[in-house]
Image: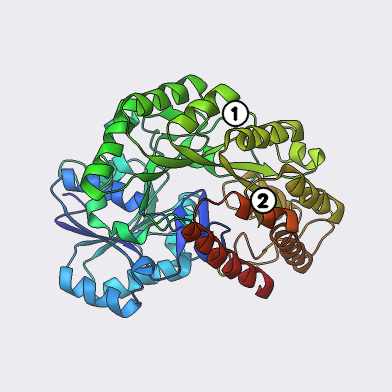
Amino acid sequence: MKVINKKAFLIVPPTGMYNREERNQALVSKLVVPALRPPLDLCYIAAVLQKKGIECRIKDFPAEGLSWAHLKILIKDFHPDTLIISSTTFTLSLDLKSCSLAKLIDPGIITITKGAHVSVQDEETMKKYPDLDIIVRREYEETFSDLADDNIDIKNILGVTYRSRGGIFRNKDRDFISDLDNIPFPSRELINNENYIRADTAKKMTTIQVSRGCPNACIFCLASFLYGKAQRKRSPGNIIEEIRECKDKFGIRDFFFRADTFTLDKDWVVRFCRQIVDMDLDIDWVCNSRVNTLDREMLGWMKKAGCWGIAMGIESGSQRILDRISKNVTMVQSREAVRLCNDLGVKSLLYFVIGFPWEDESDIRDSIRFAKELKGDFVEFNIAVPFPGTKYYELAKEGKLVTSETFEGYGYWKPMIRTEHLSSNTLSHLRKKAMLSIYLDPDYIARTFFNLKSLRIVLRYLKIGLFKLFKVASS
């Protein structure tokens, strides 16, 4: 008998406005560019369940401003047989409060969660939260399809950890999906797309997953654990078909092309961009890149195809730290990548990470100086988080550098670690110093407002910038 029977209620619980993209679990209010992304994971899951004849509803409670009381009302109204919860490392215990609430309403509701944390610490999570029935680990579409299949017993479903007859069982891992074109497009009709907007223009914006997997080995990143070391790319034609659906059906023409590294395969990027240009799709989009995978020809095609912004992990202004975190890039490559963006008029969002075990205050001062030297359009300083499943987690545990037994209430903005030289409080102070020194720098302010094209965008920048500075200064 199938586990998911007739009705599935898929939720982002009322536990804070986070981007819940496994490797990117960020509290939106703490971001330099505070854009909430749609719950693409739930939309993908709903798409595969709908193909199995399951009636689905999705509710993003933080985005809608809804509370636990609303969750209770909606469960009673819909009468789902399954509750599917998108969880984060930082909100896990609150997220799984949803399981207990559902069981109080109807003990027969099957409760399922997925997410980066539970993919690693699945058995520990099952033991701690007795109202949770199933964990779906890592890549999830095929697993959920099997859970809604009449002909597959749960004991034969790969990639799940589940509760049965008083015991906890962990099935073998599932292989990664080899052909991403076979995954149905996300069920965006089940969410309110008006809730997800570009920070600068307030226009509707959505995420399109273009590839999965990363061959790199940065010690702090979950990408290779969650999606494997081989990059698996969708075909350009398949992505363009989804772009057309977003434009025609939902009126969306602004996109974040999500990939662990969008620019990893130059031939694929150029081929994709050529098709966007040839088909005159007239879209705006952003993506991410490693600094050592970007060149002028590729970026030129990206710009022609509508790319206006690129996020890059600079991480540190100390080559010593870059080498120790296995970033496999140089500061020279960072300078060249940002220079290319500036030359071609593509905005850059530069990510720095502080708080690695070997860092002292001089390393962080080097990062602040380097951030100013690069002259990126946006700069984000995050504090390293020892996510289970990463090499950094192992190092932090071995070095007794973790200062909290729980992840709850912590994040990129609030450290739960120290370094061999710096306390948690010092890291918080240095992050604040870094952010304020960047955004209060007269040269940065002048460059930013000189490049803005309309009064409306100037006012948006002022609103976002002043709010951000207030949050940083008061943290």
* Left or right relative to 242: residue 338: right
Please name whichever residue, 294 or 11, is drawn nearer the observer in this view of the structure: 294
Is 160 drawn above or below residue 75 in the view shown? above
Label 1: element kind: loop
Is 153 drawn above or below residue 168 in the view shown? above
Is 463 drawn above or below residue 134 in the view shown? below
**Residue most extreme to the bottom:** 69
Q: Earlier in the sequence, mark 2 or mark 1?
A: 1
Residue at the image position 67 percent from the left and 50 percent from the top: 447
Please name whichever residue, 339 or 450, is drawn nearer the observer in this view of the structure: 450
As drawn, the label of residue 112 is: none
Q: Which residue is mark 1?
A: 294
Q: Position of residue 154 (x, y in %)?
A: 27, 47
Residue at the image position 53 percent from the left and 37 percent from the top: 224
Mark 2 neighbour density, 10 Å: few (under 14) some (14–19) many (20 or more):
few
Q: Position of residue 340 (x, y in %)?
A: 63, 32
State the quadrant of the C terminus: bottom right
Q: Which one is in front in this view, the residue at disc 2 or the one at disc 1?
A: 2
Q: Position of residue 252 (x, y in %)?
A: 31, 48
Quarter of the figure with residue 253: top left
Q: Amino acid at mark 2?
A: Arg
Q: CA distance from mark 2 to mark 1?
A: 23 Å
Quarter of the figure with residue 101: bottom left
Label 2: element kind: helix
**Residue most extreme to the top:** 267
Residue at the image position 58 percent from the left and 58 percent from the top: 32
As drawn, the label of residue 447 is: 2
Residue at the image position 71 percent from the left and 41 percent from the top: 325
Question: Is residue 224 in view?
Answer: yes
Q: Amino acid at mark 1?
A: Leu
